[in-house]
Image: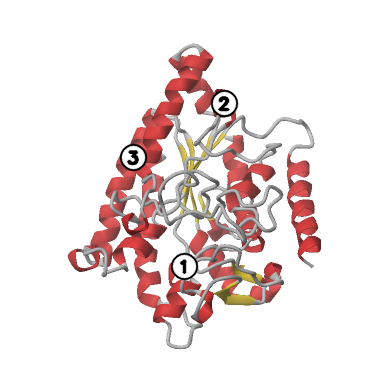
Amino acid sequence: MARAWRSFVVAVVLAVAGAATVATAEPQVPCYFVFGDSLVDNGNNNDIVSLARANYPPYGIDFAGGPSGRFSNGLTTVDVVAKLLGFDDFIPPFAGASSEQLLTGVNFASAAAGIREETGQQLGGRISFSGQVQNYQSAVQQLVSILGDEDSAAAHLRTCIFSVGMGSNDYLNNYFMPAFYNTGSLYTPPQYADDLIARYSQLLRVMYNYGARKVALIGVGQVGCSPNELAQQSANGVTCVERINSAINIFNRKLVGLVDQFNSLPGAHFTYVNIYGIFDDILKSPASHGLKVTNQGCCGVGRNNGQVTCLPFQTPCANRNEYLFWDAFHPTEAANVLVGQRTYSARLPSDVHPVDLRTLAGV
């Protein structure tokens, strides 16, 4: 069954990518840069001292190269998007990327990273969003050297797509973790969202000043529905934790406003991807999306398999294609394919604001 599902996933992704690129063998954009956390980290944490690592089995059990640092059994959402954009290969991690790879884009994401500097510190090393932006600035300087001058680098970068997904850990591994952080007592949910948005805006402005023009801001998903939060705070292990989700919704609404604000800048094309809404649609009718289990991880420990991430060499569930969650926090490849497809080509008008990535590629 797993092998059959894998073949189905590849067929779907390649069919859509092929349809989108039928007129040319080139990708729809020449470059794709990724910023984020463990949802899209593809190896940047592998060689740092951190508990937030996934470069061991059973992670990658359905990925062609085996464990790579991806926090999934297989593809992540940005892997799916990269294929749909027409890239022949996955976008490589910034760690160890060559100068040639910088031309087509790299992945700066780091597991446990947040918008706030202290977010995720209980897990050890990680590259915060500000650190990822600094790495991007370094990459831009290298591109200037490769392409010959700043104008050439700017012309190249304005055609690239930038995907930025931050904020999940600022709630999961900060605001709602009172044993390690005091932000929950210092800020109300609206105040905390304002703080995050202000910090986010400053760093996005740095990216804009360094050439980023086509930018997709990925909203925070339903953290309160993750197996980890269901295990700890849901009375029946099924009902999502509303106080967490309501706080995240405040942040997401402000993120939409941030997109509108940035779109007033010269040449800017920002968009918001409503991951929360996409997951809500899936949760309301999982069977119609090919899923059966939405409240527990395919691998893990304890109630809902939600106490910790996959243990090394743990045997995961066999029917991975039927699970929404791979471990206590992260989606399966099956879920990532669904989300990646809707990020690239919106299924509902509410999936994006104002445009999906397929449209963004063409502006």
Q: Earlier in the sequence, mark 1 or mark 3?
A: 3
Q: Amino acid at mark 2?
A: Leu
Q: Quadrant of the C terminus?
A: top right
Could you say which is closer to the camera, residue 177 or residue 286? 177
Residue 223 found in image quarter:
bottom left
Residue at image location 47% in from the left, 43% down from the top: 47
Q: How far is the residue under mark 2 from the one under mark 3?
A: 22 Å
Q: Amino acid at mark 1?
A: Gln
Question: Picture coordinates of residue 78 (x, y %)?
Answer: 58, 48
Could you say which is closer to the camera, residue 72 or residue 289? 72
Q: How far is the residue under mark 1 from the one under mark 2?
A: 34 Å
Which of the numbered marks, if any, corresponds to residue 103?
2
Which of the numbered marks, if any, corresponds to residue 203?
3
Which residue in the protein does label 1 denote? 222
Q: Earlier in the sequence, mark 2 or mark 3?
A: 2
Q: Residue furthest top?
A: 148
Residue at image location 73% in from the left, 41% down from the top: 20
